[in-house]
Image: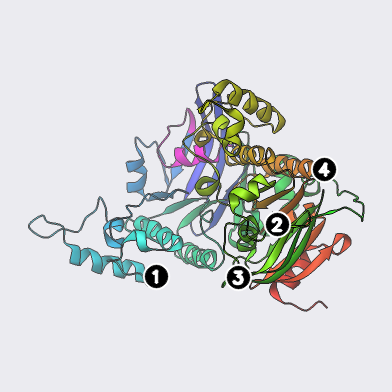
């Protein structure tokens, strides 16, 4: 369906793609992977007609083409679903599906009745039971994503490109998406699937192509490559090299935080755990098990219905988030864009956001002092940027995450809670974040790390608590920590 030969693309001062050649077949789900900056987005936009290649040829559906606009590519059957949805929240499902292709009466007026009927038929073909008249703003994120896909299916879609489609959904919603994509594949649609989540590549895709530094590394059938080999193709080092060496810790490390029988209405029941100085404690479990809710309750951001939290022996059960921060507890949420970063501000403002009094004089922010602090943290955390005035909106996910870690490390003298610290981050940036987490623990901070990635839990944790349906169902120590043991506890499988 698609054949790229020698595609190169440069921007001022940057060679984004260098002689990339690969092919995508009809009726296959083809993964495209690589670190941030590998060229995936540039290649996608070149295929979709946003960029024109400087060199090379694109052959699509049997003919050589050179798009003059994204509209030309879309008319030919190429559709891209970006990570950020392009939907109008206050319009209906049907209106969003047919926007730009409105159903009209013979008098030239919009025919809402026909649009709703056509949308219902289209959604039914895709196995979706959505009300065409429902406002998009009232839909779940997963259903909004299905509306995006339905928009593509209004046309004769031949190639569907999805950019990080599971970044905003999880659990059962991912299963539904995969089912729909397999149905499209079986109908002959070619699909390019871009994701940092390697487990999805192995669960869904037929072949995988790797880009590194704008160059094509290779294509492999998914059935013939393992996780370690794929990572080696992406970053030039093996899986075991991603994690810092496991540390040997003294058994008598002091307890920093103790949680006793903590409950959150409808979310968490009688959870107990201990965090010790200098240790990385993993919190594992399936999506919806109550891990984030437990973290928010410890931080004072969710109301507790029972139980106690002690910090250095002092009862802080009724602490507010502001009081928790003042006591030396930090929380890096999983939603860095919605809850973590001020996306319209620069690095300096984001790093000092939790310690504004230290950079304020006479009620005004001292920008020189703020920039000085930011410059030191940029160097310390190896943030790739032009300087403190760089807008975080312009940065990669990995560098955004480093900015958040830099901010909280300045205030979290006792406990740092990390909720999915590498979500949406490429493999190379993950290695840097793992180094940072280790260094924070080595400084004496008690780290609580929530992660859905089992290799991350196993590779970093000194102790692991496992949650299932709102309860902590087990704890694993040192040599007991392995993926099989975590899965067995998380899914209630009995060990053999």
Q: Earlier in the sequence, mark 3 or mark 1?
A: 1
Q: Which residue is mark 2?
A: 224
Q: Is residue 39 magenta?
A: yes
Q: Earlier in the sequence, mark 3 or mark 2?
A: 2
* Distance in Å between CA atoms under marks 4 and 2: 39 Å
Secondary structure of the residue carrying tag 1 is loop
**From where the camera sits, is residue 383 visible?**
yes
Q: Tell me the crowding category of disc 4: few under 14, some 14 to 19, or many 20 or more residues within 10 angstroms, Cα based.
A: some
* Magenta stretch bounds: 38-56
Q: Tell me the crowding category of disc 1: few under 14, some 14 to 19, or many 20 or more residues within 10 angstroms, Cα based.
A: some
Q: Which residue is mark 1?
A: 128
Q: Quadrant of residue 136?
A: bottom left
Q: Earlier in the sequence, mark 2 or mark 1?
A: 1
Q: Which residue is mark 3?
A: 305
Q: Position of residue 413 (x, y in %)?
A: 73, 43
What residue is shown at x 10% (from left), y 54% (from top)?
108
Numbered disc in front, either 4 or 3: 3
């Amino acid at each position: 369906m698609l054949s790229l030969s020698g595609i190169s693309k440069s921007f001022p001062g940057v060679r984004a793609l260098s002689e990339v050649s690969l092919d995508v077949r009809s009726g296959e789900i083809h993964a495209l992977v690589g670190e941030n900056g590998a060229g995936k987005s540039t290649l996608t936009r070149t295929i979709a007609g946003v960029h024109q290649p400087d060199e090379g040829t694109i052959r699509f559906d049997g003919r050589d083409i050179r798009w003059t606009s994204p509209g030309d590519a879309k008319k030919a059957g190429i559709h891209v679903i970006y990570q950020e949805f392009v939907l109008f929240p206050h319009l209906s499902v049907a209106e969003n599906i047919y926007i730009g292709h409105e159903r009209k009466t013979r008098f030239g007026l919009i025919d809402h009745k026909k649009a709703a009927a056509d949308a219902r038929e289209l959604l039914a073909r895709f196995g979706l039971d959505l009300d065409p008249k429902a406002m998009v703003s009232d839909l779940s994120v997963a259903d909004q994503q299905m509306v995006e896909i339905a928009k593509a299916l209004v046309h004769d879609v031949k190639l569907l490109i999805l950019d990080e489609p599971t970044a905003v959904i999880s659990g059962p919603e991912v299963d539904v998406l995969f089912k729909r994509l397999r149905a499209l594949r079986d109908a002959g649609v070619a699909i390019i699937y871009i994701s940092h989540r390697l487990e999805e590549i192995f669960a869904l895709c037929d072949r995988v192509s790797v880009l590194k530094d704008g160059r094509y590394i290779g294509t492999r059938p998914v059935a013939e490559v393992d996780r370690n080999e794929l990572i080696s193709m992406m970053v030039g080092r093996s899986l075991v090299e991603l994690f810092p060496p496991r540390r040997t810790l003294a058994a008598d490390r002091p307890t920093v935080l103790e949680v006793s029988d903590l409950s959150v209405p409808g979310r968490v029941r009688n959870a107990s755990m201990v965090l010790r100085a200098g240790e990385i404690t993993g919190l594992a479990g399936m999506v919806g098990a109550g891990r984030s809710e437990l973290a928010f309750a410890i931080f004072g951001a969710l109301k507790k219905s029972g139980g106690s939290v002690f910090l250095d022996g002092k009862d802080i059960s009724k602490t507010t988030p502001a009081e928790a921060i003042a006591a030396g507890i930090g929380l890096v949420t999983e939603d860095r864009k919605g809850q973590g970063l001020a996306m319209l501000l620069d690095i300096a403002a984001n790093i000092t956001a939790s310690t504004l009094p230290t950079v304020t004089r006479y009620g005004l922010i001292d920008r020189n002092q703020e920039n000085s602090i930011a410059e030191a943290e940029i160097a310390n955390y190896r943030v790739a940027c032009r300087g403190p005035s760089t807008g975080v909106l312009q940065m990669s996910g990995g560098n955004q995450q480093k900015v958040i870690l830099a901010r909280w490390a300045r205030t979290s003298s006792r406990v740092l809670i990390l909720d999915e610290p590498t979500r949406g981050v490429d493999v190379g940036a993950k290695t840097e974040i793992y180094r940072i987490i280790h260094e924070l623990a080595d400084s004496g901070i008690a780290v609580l790390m929530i992660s859905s990635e089992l290799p991350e839990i196993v590779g970093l944790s000194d102790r692991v608590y496992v949650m299932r349906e709102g309860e902590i169902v087990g704890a694993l120590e040192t040599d007991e920590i392995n993926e099989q043991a975590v899965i067995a506890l998380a899914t209630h499988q009995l060990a053999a």
